[in-house]
Image (cartoon, rainbow, N blue to C red):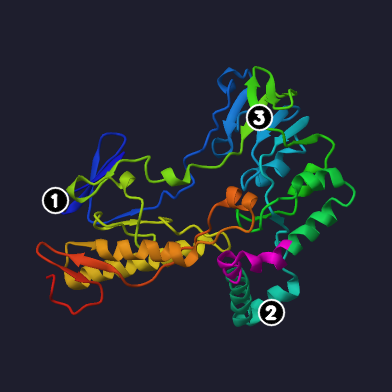
Amino acid sequence: MAATWENRRWTLCLRDGSQVNARVVVWGTGALHRPAVPDLPGLSEFQGRVFHSAHWDHDHDLRGRRVAVVGTGASAIQFVPAIQPQVAHLTLFQRTPPWVLPKPDGPVPARLRRLYRALPLAQRLQRALVYARNEAVVAGFLRPSRMAVIERFARAYLDRRFADRPDLKARLTPDFTIGCKRILLSNDYYPALKQPNVDLVTEKIVSVTPTGVVTADGVEHAADTIVLGTGFKVADGLKSIPITGRDGVRLSDAVEGFLGTTIAGFPNLFVLTGPNTGVGHSSMIFMIESQLNYVLDALRLLDERGAVALDTRRDRQDAYTPACSTGSTARCGSPAGARAGTSTRTGATARSGPTTRSGSGTAPAGSAPGTTN
C-alpha cells in the first residue's frame, strides 16, 4: 500500500493493485503496530515456537508448556497473569522492573448505578474527577520531585504484595524515579509472579539455544515456547507505508508535526496519534477524540473557504516543536532513571495553526475569508 499527493488529491494504491482517489486522508494506524523483535543470538535456531505478543499464535496451546517470556513492560503485565495458570512453567526475563500501581477497576455498586441513572450529572462529575486526577500527574512529569507521593504509594503496594517474599521485592523495585518510564496498572501481575510455577530472571540474556535461553551467569533456562513482550518500534510507526507529499517529500523523513495531527508538506493528511501525542498519565482515547475534533474543524474550514487543500505552515510547525520540547521535557531524578526513561513529553491539541490552500494562495486558519477562494 502507498499514498501519494498528486493533482491536488491523494492517490492510494492498495495491496490488490487497485487505486482510490481521495480529497482527504485520515491516517489512523497508530504507533503500536510494528513489533520490536530483539536481536538475540541463536533465536532463529530455537526448536520451539517463537512469537511476539502482538502476533499471538492462537493455534499454539500453552497448556503444559515451559514458556519463556522476554520483557516486563505494558504487554507482559497483561498476558503473564493470563497464561500463568495454563503453563507448566513460566520464566520471566526482566531487564528493568517497572513501577506498578493497583488498577482501580472494581465493579460499580448497585447504589451508584441507581444514582447515575437518576442523576446523570453525578456520573459526569465522577468522570471529571477521574480525568482531573490523571491530569494532575503532569505536574510530576514536569518536575519529577513532585512524584514522591505517587512513588511512596507504589512502594507501599510492593511492600504489601511481597511482605513474605523480600527476595522478589528486591528484584522488582525500580531504581529510577517513577514516571521516567510508563507507569503500569495491574492487580494480578504481582500475584502471578509469586506462583510456584514462575521464575523471575534478572540476568542478561546472552543467547538462545535450540532448547532454551542462556543468561550471563551461564544458566540455560529450558523452554519450548518463547513469547516476546518486547514492545514496538514506535518511532517507525509512519515508515511502514510509503506516503509522499508535495514536492516528493516522504513522510518517513518528516519527524516533526503540528499539534500531533498535521505535517507541513502533506496537504489534507491528518495523522492520529502523531508526533508528541503519546501520554503517560491519561487516556489516548481522549487524545484521539481531541484530534478528531481538530480534523472536523479543518474539514469545515475547507468547505467554508471553498479551498482545495489545507496544509500546515512550516514556520508554525518549526516554532511549535521546540516549544513542545522545552515546555514539557523533564530529566529523571537519577542516572538510572535517565537511562531507563530519557525524557517525558506530553502532547496537546488546539484549534489554530493550519493554513488553507487553493490554487494560488494561503491563509492562516481563522483569518478573514476571501483570501484563498
Q: Is residue 259 visible?
A: no
Q: Is residue 242 above or below residue 352?
A: above
Q: Tell me which corner region of the image, top left, top right, bottom left or bottom right, holds residue 306.
A: bottom left
Q: Amino acid at mark 3?
A: Ile
Along the viewing direction, whichever of 42 and 134 lies nearer the viewer: 42
Q: Is residue 214 magenta?
A: no
The alpha-carbon separation of the residues under discs 1 and 2 comes to: 57 Å
Instruction: Give the label, 3 or 1, closer to the camera.
Output: 3
Q: Is residue 320 visible?
A: yes
* Mark 1 surroundings within 10 Å by alpha-carbon count, few (fewer than 14), some (14 through 19), many (20 or more): few
SS of the residue at dot 3?
strand
Q: Amino acid at mark 1?
A: Asn
Percent across and percent down for residue 216 are 70, 27
* Mark 2 surroundings within 10 Å by alpha-carbon count, few (fewer than 14), some (14 through 19), many (20 or more): few
Residue at the front extreme? 335
The alpha-carbon separation of the residues under discs 2 and 3 comes to: 54 Å
Mark 3–mark 1 contact, CB under 8 Å?
A: no
Residue receiving disc 2: 115
Marked residue nearer the N-terminal end (2 or 3): 2
Q: Tell me which corner region of the image, top left, top right, bottom left or bottom right, holds residue 261.
A: bottom left
Residue receiving disc 3: 205
SS of the residue at dot 1?
loop
The alpha-carbon separation of the residues under discs 3 and 1 comes to: 53 Å
Q: Which residues are magenta?
A: 136-151
Q: Residue at x 63, y 17 (%)?
A: 47
Residue receiving disc 1: 7
Q: Residue at x 90, y 48 (%)?
A: 164
Marked residue nearer the N-terminal end (3 or 1): 1
Q: Amino acid at mark 2?
A: Leu
